[in-house]
Each structure stands twice: as structure tokens, then as C-alpha cells.
Amino acid sequence: MRDIASMNLSTNCVRVRLGETQSSAPALVQLRAELEVFGDIYRFERLLWPHPSVVVAFYDRRAAAAVKEKWGDNCTFEAQDGPSSVFVSARDFAKLVVTGISDMSSLPDGGFC
């Protein structure tokens, strides 16, 4: 896998094209399990148009980038799904071990974003 600095981290969402044998319910369960290896899934949706595929949104953009890298041409990035910011109170922030974030801002109420 490439270094995280060289990965496309613009979105948490990818579309994975399904093969002919991947559209059954058991195959979709198996595919979801394969994708969960990359990170926690926020949304998993089967689409039939314009071709059979699943749209998968992860909580972490790095998971989407890793899926795209593994699936290559059978996978495309989709628009960001959901917010890309997390708001944490100052009390809770003091308990966190923070690594791998792109930016942090303090809020007027003492919290962080």
C-alpha cells in the first residue's frame, strides 16, 4: 500500500462495480465483509444503474482510498457522504490520543473541531 501522504483523501465514499456473480445476497454479505477490513462502514448501498455496483461510505477517508487502490478500475470515488468534521468538547479532547488528522481548530466554547 502507498504512503498515506500520496493517497487521494478527498472523499470517504467509493463505488465498487459488481461482477455477474456478485449481485446475490450472500455475495453482497461477503463483499461487505471484505470491505470492512479497510475500516468501519457508514453506508453500504446496492445500486443497479448504470451498472450493478455498491456505494460504500466509510467513517475514515483513508479506508476509501485504500479500497480504490485495491480495486483499481473496478472502483471510482463518489462525492463525500456525510460531514468530514468531528466536534469534540475540551473535556473529551483531553482524553483522546490524536493521530492522523489533517487539521484542528479550537472553538469559542473551548471545544475542538
Image: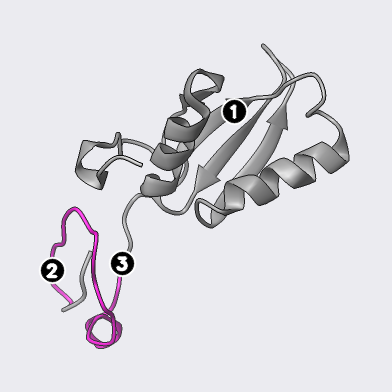
Residue at the outermost front position:
1
Q: Are marks 2 and 3 in contact (CB under 8 Å)?
A: no
Taking the image as drawn, is residue 12 in sight?
A: no
Relative to residue 63, is residue 113 depicted above or below? Answer: below
The residues bearing labels 1 and 2 have C-alpha atoms spaced at a distance of 37 Å
Q: Earlier in the sequence, mark 2 or mark 3?
A: 3
Q: Residues within 10 Å of mark 2 (few under 14, many from 20)?
A: few
SS under mark 3: loop
SS under mark 1: strand
Which three-letter amino acid code belongs to the residue tagged 1?
A: Val
Q: Quadrant of residue 46?
A: top right
Which three-letter amino acid code belongs to the residue tagged 3?
A: Phe
- Residue at 20 percent across and 70 percent down: it is 112
The residues bearing labels 2 and 3 have C-alpha atoms spaced at a distance of 10 Å
- Residue at 26 percent across and 78 percent down: it is 97
Taking the magenta stretch, the answer to whether it contains residue 95 is yes
The colour scheme applied to this rendered structure is: one colour
Main secondary structure found in the magenta portion: loop
The residue where tag 1 is placed is 16
The residue where tag 2 is placed is 106
Please indicate whether residue 98 sits to the left or right of residue 20 in the image: left
The residue where tag 3 is placed is 87
Instruction: Using the image as rendered, state which of residue 58 and residue 87 is in the foreground.
Output: 58
Relative to residue 21, is residue 50 depicted above or below? Answer: above
SS under mark 2: loop
Please indicate whether residue 100 sits to the left or right of residue 66 in the image: left
* Front label number (3 vs 1): 1
Q: Quadrant of residue 2?
A: top left
Which three-letter amino acid code belongs to the residue tagged 2?
A: Ser
Magenta highlight range = 88-109
